[in-house]
Every structure is written in C-alpha cells, then in structure tokens.
Image: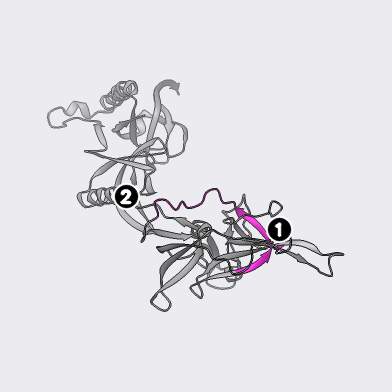
Amino acid sequence: MSTALFSIGDIVALNSHPYTENLQNVIIGGEPNILTPLMVVGEIHAISATSILDSSPQKVFRYKCFWFSYKSFTFSECLVTEEHIKLITAINSNISLQGLKRGMSLSLRTAFIEHEKLKSSFSIHGGQRQSAQENNLINPLLSFIPPILQLVDVTKHKPKFPLTYKKTSTPVRWVSAWDVKCIYFDSRSEKIQEVVLPIEVLQLFKENDHTKVELINRGINENSFFLLTKNNQTTIIRPISISYRYGSYYARGFDYLTNSFYDTEIGDSININDIESPIKSTFPNFNIELHPESANKHAITSEFVKAVSEHKLSKHYLRIKYKNKEDHITVRTVKDYKLISINEDEKNVIYLVGFCLLRNSERNFRLDRIQQLEVLNLTY
C-alpha cells in the first residue's frame, strides 16, 4: 500500500476535471453537464494487470470511489486506476467513533467543495451577436452536491473479498474498518432512503449554535445592533436577515466599518455582543435656534477639528459623509487618522488623513467637504 498514490478518504477527480489540489476556485464555463464529479476514495485494490501498452504484467492500484449524482439522486461508486485520477484534497482526519450519536448530521467529504462550485453563462439581448448586449451570469453549479445525511448506526465492515493474497498473505485490498448507515430525503421519489458508506468518505457537520441564531433573530425584530468579532477583528453590524444554506445559518447585515453589507456563518468562529447604538456622538452638533452663529462654515470646521483631535487619543473609529469635488457623496469609516494643514492657492486647507476601511488604504479627505462626522462606539 505504501506505493499507492492515494489514501482512503482522499478527494479525487478524473484527470479531465478543471480542479487541482491548488486550484479550486475556477468558474466552470461551456456545458457544465459534462463536468465529472469530485469523488472520495473508499477502498484500494492492488492487482496485476496486462495491456498492449505494457511489455510485462504491472502492479496496478484501483480505487473504489464514491460520489453523489444529483440527476439520479443516488450515491454512486466506480473503480478507477490511479493513472486516471488526481488528488484534489488529501484526508487530514477521520471521524472519531467517540461522541457519535444517532441523528447527527453528516455528508460526503466532497460536499463543501461542490457547494462552492460556480458556473458562468451568457445572456444575449437584442439583435445580432455583434451588436447585442451580453451579460455574463455567475450561478451555483449544483450537479453533484450530496444531501445532508442523518446518522442511524455504525457497524464493523465485513469485507466481501479477501484482504490478502492467500499464498503469501500479501495485502491486496485495503478497506474501511467501519460502515456508517445513514438516512436522507430523496426529493425525486419523496421518500426517506438508506445508504451505507465507509466512515472515511464522510464528514460531520458542526452543530448549529441556536443561541446565537436566536440572538441575531431578536436583533432583526428589534432593529438592534451588535458588536461582531471574527478572526480577532471586531465590527458593528445591524442584522437584516438570516439564511440557511446547506446545514448552516448565515447572518446578513450592514457593516458600519466597511459601510457595506456583511454576510457570515453563525458558528463557533464568531462572538456577538449587544450594543445600544453604533454611534457615540455626531458632529456638527448645534442648536441653530439657540445659537444660529454656530451654523457657519468656520464653526463647523472648528467642531470637526476638536472631535478628531479628542477621539484620536481614544482611538475611536470615525465615520464620515464626504462630498468629493464632483459632488458625489460617499460614506467612509477611517482609523489611524490625523489632521494635516497645508497651503493651497494661498489658502489654509485642513485634511483628515486616515486609513479608509472601504478602500483598505490610506485616503485624504478635505475637512470642508465632510458633511457629517460620526464617532463610532468602537475603538481600534
């Protein structure tokens, strides 16, 4: 077995497949229905084979591979030799028998790669192709996404054929030690089906954190805000909706740092805390009825200078509504900011210079073009 190229549990594909071990974000074009499936190795057989292409008998490894066909809605298997397949993802861990419980959710190991697969297609509107408008559409490619399985039982594997050569006791077949019986819903026949698969071709789904899901759902209903931390980075979001995709819940919300919509899986990788408001204070801040003189340009600039200087020390994020020289208004959030005064056309002009989280680089903003400045309830 040491000479076999692949191991039980490896994800492989026919050589004609566009994916490789280091390239799995390719968008599939043309006719996606001729694309071959990703497969998982479930057994390995060593055989001696002859061919007109070989001068003498060769030791050949054949692999029993498993995949799911969405077209027939069944788990399929085939035997292929190693010169016809390539590695996509090597197995790095097996499911542990400890902690397995009936009803747990599992899936074929190819599931998450297949779930991310995309296809492109053209939509042509009007007239001849040369003059028509073309739209390149990107959509999910769902041909081989396996269903979510529910664990029924785990039993010792009973090989149908000898694992060693009788005369020499040389290993000729490598199989799983455990079989996993599962059920899944067959949407074609609208029946619950059973399937038995080697434990190495399967992976466990993480259990959903319903406490976090319910917290975000409450936030949506109450129009609340949250501090969301992921990968040691914290942002402020206003949750908008919850979606469910292939066994996991996802939260979609508005991100006050990037000022764009944010989509994340609700799981162990995130921490969520309530926050009363995303805004600590807003400038300019004046009562025009009581102090009409404070509404002039110089007074507003003075307010901005004071706010920036004070919150630079506390390292609060600043969120600005900015009008550029073309009168186009954008909303930006900045950190690591400072004020710089320069002479332009014999006029003293003050700039807010800081790291813009929308552009992910340092940007300069003329203070007299800032329409509004908000200090966020978050420090960096």
Label 2, on which residue? 209
Question: Which x, y percent locates residue 123?
Answer: 52, 68
**Chain-order first, disc 1 or disc 2:** 1
**Observer able to see residue 52:** yes
Indicate the quadrant where residue 16 lies. Answer: bottom right
Identity of the amino acid at label 2? Answer: Asp
Viewer-side residue, 46 vs 231: 46
Range drawn in magenta: 78-100
Q: Nearer the viewer, mark 1 or mark 2?
A: 1
Question: Which x, y percent locates residue 1?
Answer: 68, 54
Q: For the view shown, which residue lies furthest in the right direction?
A: 55
Residue 94: in magenta span: yes
Label 1, on which residue? 170
Q: Residues within 10 Å of mark 2 (few under 14, many from 20)?
A: few
Residue 25: in magenta span: no
Identify the secondary structure beneath mark 1.
loop
Q: For the view shown, which residue lies furthest in the left direction?
A: 290
Looking at the rendered image, the quarter that the C terminus falls into is top left
